[in-house]
Every structure is written in C-alpha cells, then in structure tokens.
Image (spheres, grey):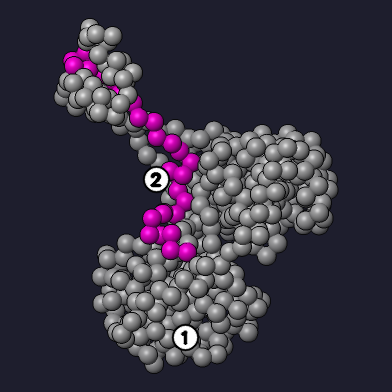
Amino acid sequence: MTMRRFDAQAPGFTEAFAQFLSLRRAQGSEDIHAAAAAIVREVRSRGGEAVASYTEKFDRLRVDPASLQADGLEIERLAAACPQDVREALDFAAKRIETYHAQQKPSDHSFDDGHGLELGWRWSPVDAVGVYVPGGRASYPSSVLMNVVPARAAGVERIVMVAPAPGGELNPAVAYAAMRAGVTEFYPIGGAQAVAALAYGAGQLKPVDKIVGPGNAWVAAAKRIVFGDVGIDTIAGPSEITVVADNQNDPAWMAADLLSQAEHDPLAQSILVTDDPAFAERVWAAAEAQIPRLSTAKATEESWRNFAAVVIAPLSQASAIVNQIAPEHVELAVADPDAIAKDIRHSGAIFLGRWAPEALGDYVTGSNHVLPTSGAARFASGLSVLDFMKRTSIQRISEAGFRHLADAAETLAACEGLPAHGLSVRIRRGGPQ
C-alpha cells in the first residue's frame, strides 16, 4: 500500500497531522456505553445471579452464583500446566518488575514551619484492588505482572483478579503469573459484569477499592461508569508507538519495532519520524514484507493500512512532533538520543538508542508497560506504585501556631460567607459567639 507521508516543513503540517491523529482517537460507541450501563445496573441489583447469567451468555461458562467459581478453573491447577520455559521467563520478568517498582515507594515526611506547626503527609496502601485481565485475543501474562506487582510493592493486602475464561479456557501462563505476582482471589468472569462485581460485590466477591487493568470497549465503558464509587487506573486505548530514526539503522529493525504495536489491535498506531525520505521508503517496504509472515497479520495489516504514517522532518524537530503525538511509547534510534529526549514532555515511556526496542519494555526491563494512550500522556503517567497508595496530610498545631493563623482564617471565613468556620476559630480566642 502507498506510504502515508507528512512533511513537517510543509505549510499546514501541524493542522493536517493533528487531523490525522484525531481520526483514530474519535473511535467509540454510545451504544456500548448504554449496554454496559444496563449490565452494571443488573449486577448491582441481582449480584451473583446476574454475573452468572452474563458469564454463561457471553463466555459459555457456568459459574456458581454464590462462589462465582467454575469447575476445573482452580488457579493452582491451571498454573501447573504452564510450560517450564514460560515459567522461567515470567520469574525473570517478575524479579525485574519488583526491583523497579520497589524504588518508587514514597516516604512519609514532616517539617516544622517555624510558627508552631508541624506539617506533613503519610502514605498508605489501599486495602483492596481488583485487577482485570483480558481473555481471548488479548490474553497477556505480562499484564498480570505489570498490574499486580506494583500493588504488592505498595503493600496492598487483598488483590482480586478477574479474567474471562471463554468455554472454560484460561491461559495457564496467566494463572502462573497471577500466583507468582501475589493474587489473593481469582474469579473466572469478564466483561462489564466483572467490573461491576468488583465495584459493588457479587456472591462471595466483596467490593474492592480500585480497579486496574486493560479490557475491551465494554470493560472501558464499565470502568467509566463505576468510577467515583471505586477508583480506576485509566481508560486504556489501542497501543501506539512512535519511532524516531536516522538512516544509520537497519530498516528491517525499525519496521519490526513499528509492527510490534500494530499487531496489538486494528486501531493501534505506528508512526516513523525520520529526516531521510529514502530511508523511510525502505522501512515501509520492510514492514510490508514482514506483515504477511506474522500470525497476527490480519490485525497488523488493518492497523498499518489505516493508521500508520511517516513524518519527514529534521531531527531537530523530532521532540516537538513527539510532543504533538503524545504517544504511549517512543523509540529514539539515533546517534544522540539524549539530545531529543531532553525536550520530550509528553510520552508514556522513552526508549533510548538503537538497541532499545519497545518490546523489551513490554516484558523485561522492569518498567511498567501500562501507559497512557490516545494523547493522555499530555496529563497522565504510566501505572506505578503510587497508583495503589494514597496520601494523607497531617497537621499538628500548637497554641502559638493557632494564633499565627487565626486572623487570616477568620477573614477568609467571613469572605466566603461561612460563619461556623469563623466561629470555630473565634471561639478559641474567647471572642463573641
């Protein structure tokens, strides 16, 4: 297919490129939201009976309405079927993810302001987290590690995993990853009904405080609906990668890196930024040669046809283009990646150098692969230990500290028309009640 090309130095580039980016980000369905809302309402009113009914309807699996369990789907038994080489790879990845996330745990802090007040904050983990793990095409044991390990590092005691098991099938690697990471409860349920069960409880499944993990459009819609009653991580969109590359790279390497995200989903997006048009042509040709050889060729080809693009630009403009895209992942396969990276403000994760394919970050660098998509890197960060913790402010106030603050507090209370606020200060000063 013809290469979709943008010239960053052409008039109107910024507007034309923004319009191209908006095409994919506009995907969505009000019908899905309405259907998910109906499922959530049903689970809230009927609990386990509704979850069991929807699970049989959508996943062809019978679960007990009280226990939400199904015969033959005990997680320990499933994990035993995980191949040894996969176990070893998951153990290797888990150790690196544990090491990385242990460094993120924040410290409590306090300080004396010099006026009789001791101020500070204390961090504590949430009590219970629900982790949604997709089934079907998107059955990824690596995502189990990426969602559960940070929760465990934060100190969360109850970690509940839900994962659909269509026809009674669940990936043994997912089960092994769950056990290795520290899941404390497992239910073979999925879809909007599983999100509702995590949020409001169903059968023996008690509500959690926060729900994390990717899912399909119905899962995303359900997470939006329950947000506020429970916390959520983010609304995950299709995968994205931007590769900034000079002509000193092997075109086949860059093509493979671009396709590593295109294969995730027909709505995934792969963008190459380079200063050499001839090199761009070689990368595009290499990608088109690789696609038919992939087992994921159908989804990859659709993503490539509809959403892949090349931007021809001087490398001095690369950081500005990346910031406009705000991609989930960006690779900087150039001689001096730090020169570009220092000006990148909007990206979920940055990979520096020619030997840093994003695929390593998906599995084994240790950094989290749950990252902001669809431009959300402008205001959001990837999943971390902080997502499973909350900060409580602490204020110790002496009499001297009180007197230092009282006048300003009374003035502001009067300004805002809140007399009881003012009284709670004034009464301590012996003023009129």
Q: Secondary structure at mark 2?
A: loop
**Tally of numbered discs:** 2
> Decide: marks 2, 1 in contact (CB < 8 A)?
no
Q: Residue at x 28, y 19 (%)?
A: 422
Assign the C terminus to one quadrant of the image: top left
Q: Say left or right for 223 vs 243.
A: right
SS type, badge 1: loop
> What residue is drawn where x is 47% and y is 86%?
4
Q: Which mark is residue 104?
A: 2
Q: Which mark is residue 385?
A: none
The answer for how far apart the CA atoms under marks 2 and 1 are is 40 Å
Residue 358 visible from this viewpoint: yes
Q: Is residue 330 above or below residue 416?
A: below
Circle 2: residue type: Gln
Write the start and end of the magenta stretch as one range: 374-403
Pointer 1: residues within 10 angstroms few (<14), some, or many (20+)? some
Q: Look at 47% across and 58% down and name the residue there.
A: 371
Q: Residue at x 66, y 49 (%)?
A: 37
Q: Position of residue 315 (x, y in %)?
A: 29, 79
Residue 63 in the image, given as x and y percentages of width and height: 81, 45
Residue 64 location, x and y as percent? 82, 41
Task: Tell me the quarter of the picture where residue 420 sits.
Answer: top left
Using residue 386 as the reference point, say whether residue 319 is left or right of it: left
Name the side, left or right, on which 398 lies relative to 363: left
What's under tag 1, amino acid-wise? Arg
Q: Which residue is mark 1?
A: 4
Is residue 241 positioned above or below 62 on the image? below
Q: Is residue 399 magenta?
A: yes
Quarter of the image where the N terminus is located: bottom right
